[in-house]
Amino acid sequence: MKARFFLWLLLVLSSTVAAGPPVIEIEIKDHLFYPDEVRIPADTKVKLLVKNLDPTAEEFESYELNREKVIAGNSEVIIFIGPLSAGEYPFFGEFFPKTAQGRVIVE
Amino acid sequence: MLLNAVIIILREVLEAALIVSVFLALSQLLNRKLWWMLIAMVMGFAGAYVYAINLSQISMALEGTGQEVLNASLHSLIFICLLIFMISVPHQARPGWRRLNLFTIVLAVIIAIVREGSEIILYIKGFYGIPELLHPVLIGGAVGAGIGLSVGVFFYYLLVNMHKRSGIWLGYLMLLLVGGSMIAQAVEFMIQADYISASAPLWDSSHLVSERSAIGQLLYALLGYEATPAPQQAAAYFGSIALLVIAACVSFFFRSKSS
């Protein structure tokens, strides 16, 4: 009975977690994005969790996505994107634009 | 690295310098003392430093939307300052209104420096531990700041040396554009934080003037140009400009009646 209850609880909890927008993790290391290409479904809101592993600050910026957010060194931020129509949306690190380049592909 | 530092610092300084120079010129044209400028700048940089060193905690506050909420609040506060400024100018014969008018100028300058200065401090602070990069970044930053400040100085002298009436009108017009841009940016931050739901852009003029181009960047600083604005952003932009115009007109109308 108890085991069943916990299974039920687990199911409920996981479904509430899944009910929020899907989370995609992006890391910044040596002024590069990992991964530098993110694929998301069209017309869906997505939560980007951007972790800056460098000691230097970075600014996540995208003209196409209309997003800009400063990330202090060795810290992380959350950025909501979408719902978007299909297409390619480049983003970059404003502080290190030579290397920090990436794109969101909506399909 | 050097060129990159020039561009980043230029962008941030340009935005703050435009607001500061227009206010400075209008204060001059409205016969204000300019000593407050120094105090406002010192307070602005102190605030920018506090913002910069606490950025991580601010970002993670309010379920990861602290940075957006704070930036949207700063932009909105600048707009409110502009609104009260516009309302108080026609009544400046009265000492109370005059003090309020000066207070809005000082506050707007402080907030503008806090907002743009914090990004500059964060950017440069990142290079403290990397001496071989810190040097070019500081030189590049100084060049960028120099260019940005020059544009501010240019606008200041342009407004001050014009025929007084046209100077005040052009200054007002620039404040209207700054006001619209502030509210549009605040709305953009609220969309980014998911407090306002996102929708498809109202138009796409990126093939005409890209936001990446030098003209796009300048138009962004001057008018708050966006190549792909959300409908809410555009509505907020034009709505806030209309509000400023109406408030200024109503205030001016009542001044004429009472005097």
Image: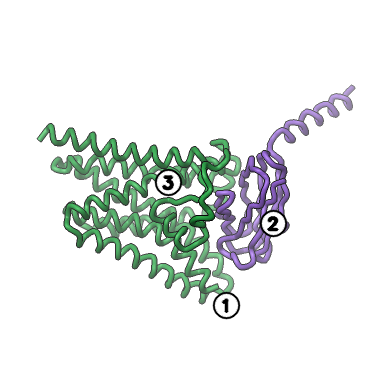
Q: Residue furthest top?
A: A1
Determine if marks 3 and 2 fall on one subunit: no
Q: What is the chain identity of the residue bearing mark 2?
A: A
Tell which of B128 and B93 is nearer to you: B93
Residue B179 lies in quadrant: top left
**Label 3 element class:** helix
* Residue picked out by circle 2: A27
Palette colour of chain B: green
Residue B48: percent from the left, percent from the top?
Answer: 44, 56
- Where does residue B163 sit, x and y in percent of width and height? 17, 57
For marks 2 and 1, give the one nearer the viewer: 2
The residues tagged by marks 1 and 3 sit, at their Cα atoms, a distance apart of 35 Å
Name the residue that disc number 1 marks.
Answer: B132
Q: Which residue is mark 3?
A: B74
Colour in which chain A is shown?
A: purple
Query: Residues at marks 2 and 1, common chain?
Result: no
Chain for disc number 3: B
Query: What's the amino acid at mark 1?
Result: Glu
Q: Is residue B184 above or below residue B42?
A: above
The reply to whether the C-beta atoms of the residues labelled 2 and 1 are less than 8 Å apart is no
Residue type for callout 3: Leu
Q: Where does the image place residue B243, in percent across and percent down from the top left? A: 33, 37
In the image, residue A12 lies at what x, y percent?
A: 78, 28
The answer to whether residue B189 is visible is no
The image shows a total of numbered marks equal to 3
Residue type, label 2:
Glu
Residue drawn at 43 percent across, 39 percent down: B236
> Which residue corresponds to the image point at 55% horizontal and 52% vertical from the top-left?
A68
Of mark 1 and mark 3, the one earlier in the sequence is 3
Decide which of A81, B70 is in the foreground and name it.
Answer: A81
Q: Residue furthest left?
A: B259
